[in-house]
């Protein structure tokens, strides 16, 4: 696998992730406020964690170190992104959801991003 393959896999993930986040609770009519909240959510949980994980994996030594660094950083950053989103959008509306429930949603996305970042870091350059 080359780095371009890993980058394409990440872009596919990001497109599917963003579409899922938008259409999972989209209002019947277009809402600019909802779109902004989805963009913030995707940035906090889909973009920033990946690039932090890629950076950490690139700095780690050895293949195993790169995998561990990418997975750990992506998981932590994605869960933290969900916690930040909770503070910005959910907590002010008092929807009866705890921060722990929201932060745990980052496990799946964080794991996928960690794997993609590790693949990028361990892939050969093209």
Image (tube, rainbow, N blue to C red):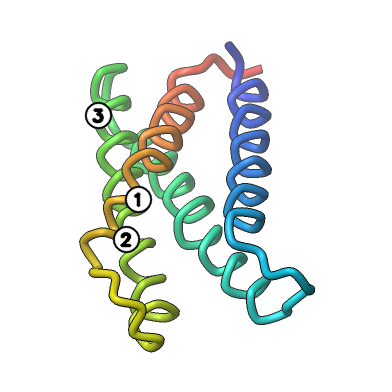
- How far apart are labels 3 and 2 at the CA level? 24 Å
Pointer 2 with pointer 1, Cβ within 8 A: yes
The residue to which callout 2 is attached is: 102
Is residue 38 placed above or below 75 in the rendered structure? Answer: below
Q: Position of residue 110 (x, y in %)?
A: 38, 42
The residue to which callout 1 is attached is: 105
The residue to which callout 3 is attached is: 68
Identify which residue, 30 or 84, lies in the foreground. 30
Is residue 17 placed above or below 86 in the rendered structure? Answer: above
Question: How many C-alpha atoms fall within 10 Å of the one at disc 3: few (<14), some, or many (≥20)?
Answer: some
Q: Position of residue 10 (x, y in %)?
A: 59, 34
Please identify, in this view, whether the residue under mark 1 or under mark 3 is nearer the observer.
Answer: 1
25 left or right of 19 in image: left
Question: How many C-alpha atoms fall within 10 Å of the one at disc 2: few (<14), some, or many (≥20)?
Answer: some
The numbered mark, 1 or 3, whose residue comes first in the sequence reads: 3
Pointer 1 with pointer 3, Cβ within 8 A: no
Quadrant in the rendering for residue 88:
bottom left
Secondary structure under tag 1 reads loop
- How far apart are labels 2 and 1 at the CA level? 5 Å
Quadrant in the rendering for residue 11:
top right
| Outermost residue to the top | 1
Q: How many marks?
A: 3
- Residue under the image location 44 percent in, 39 percent down: 54
- Residue under the image location 45 percent in, 55 percent down: 45
Secondary structure under tag 3 reads helix
What mark, if any, has residue 78 been given in the picture?
none
| Outermost residue to the bottom | 92
Is residue 83 placed above or below 36 in the rendered structure? Answer: above
The numbered mark, 3 or 2, whose residue comes first in the sequence reads: 3
8 left or right of 55 in image: right
């Amino acid at each position: 696998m080359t780095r371009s393959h890993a980058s394409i896999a990440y872009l596919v993930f990001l497109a599917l992730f963003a579409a899922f986040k938008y259409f999972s609770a989209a209002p019947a009519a277009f809402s600019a406020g909802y779109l902004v909240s989805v963009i913030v959510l995707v940035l906090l949980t889909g973009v920033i964690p990946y690039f932090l994980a890629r950076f950490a994996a690139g700095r780690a030594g050895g293949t195993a170190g790169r995998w561990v660094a990418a997975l750990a950083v992506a998981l932590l950053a994605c869960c933290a992104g969900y916690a930040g989103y909770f503070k910005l959008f959910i907590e002010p509306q008092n929807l009866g959801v705890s921060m722990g429930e929201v932060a745990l949603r980052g496990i799946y996305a964080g794991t996928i991003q960690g794997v993609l970042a590790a693949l990028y870091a361990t892939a050969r350059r093209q």
